[in-house]
Image: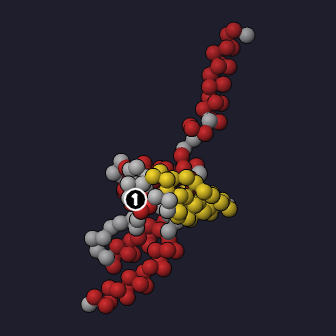
Amino acid sequence: MCRYAPAIGLMFLMLVMVLSPSCKKKSGTPAGTLLMIQGLYVDGKSEEAETYFTRGTLKAMQEIEKMLPGQKSHYGAEKLFMKGAEWDVLSEKISGDRAEIQIRFTSHPVENLLGFVVTMKMKREDGLWKRDMEDELRNSIPLLRQIKSRKR
């Protein structure tokens, strides 16, 4: 029995690591993805944060950037998830590869966001939960075209 003790101990340690929620990727849940996005923005890695936006969202962002050169933005995400922002998850509804998560900001450097409740759509792509803002961004494109045409 003693010669198997190290192997049994190693197997037990590996089992604990696999089953431990803290060892899993944070993006394994919609709520975890929001934490991943915040960490990247806080670290100044906004380009890497794009990993956590759906392909449709990124395409819509690119369309808007063509209309508004020099206005590259993640459309408020960088402000919502800035350093010092904290939130409670009010609900997380998952249905297949789609989810909606509702959060309330409990702490935020921008004072008027305290208590602000926001619902975010999420979609699982490439094995990760990602922010899905495609519909909202695409709905804003006609309005932006109108505004741009009036400025001419």
Specify the quadrant of the image occupied by residue 3.
top right
Quadrant in the picture for the C terminus = bottom left
Residue 108 place in picture, x, y as percent: 42, 54
The crowding category of the residue bearing disc 1, from other C-alpha atoms within 10 Å (few below 14, some 14 to 19, many at least 20), is few
Residue 130 place in picture, x, y as percent: 52, 59
Specify the quadrant of the image occupied by residue 148.
bottom left
Height in image: 131 above or below 24?
below
Residue 132 place in picture, x, y as percent: 52, 65
Drawn side of residue 122 relative to residue 148, left or right:
right
Q: Residue at x 34, y 73 (%)?
A: 65
Q: Residue at x 60, y 32 (%)?
A: 17
Viewer-closest of 42 and 26: 42
Q: Residue at x 31, y 90 (%)?
A: 150
Viewer-closest of 76 and 27: 76
Q: Amino acid at mark 1?
A: Glu
Task: Please give the residue where the numbered disc 1 appears in the rendered image.
Answer: 111
Q: Residue furthest top?
A: 2
Quadrant in the picture for the N terminus = top right
Height in image: 26 above or below 6?
below
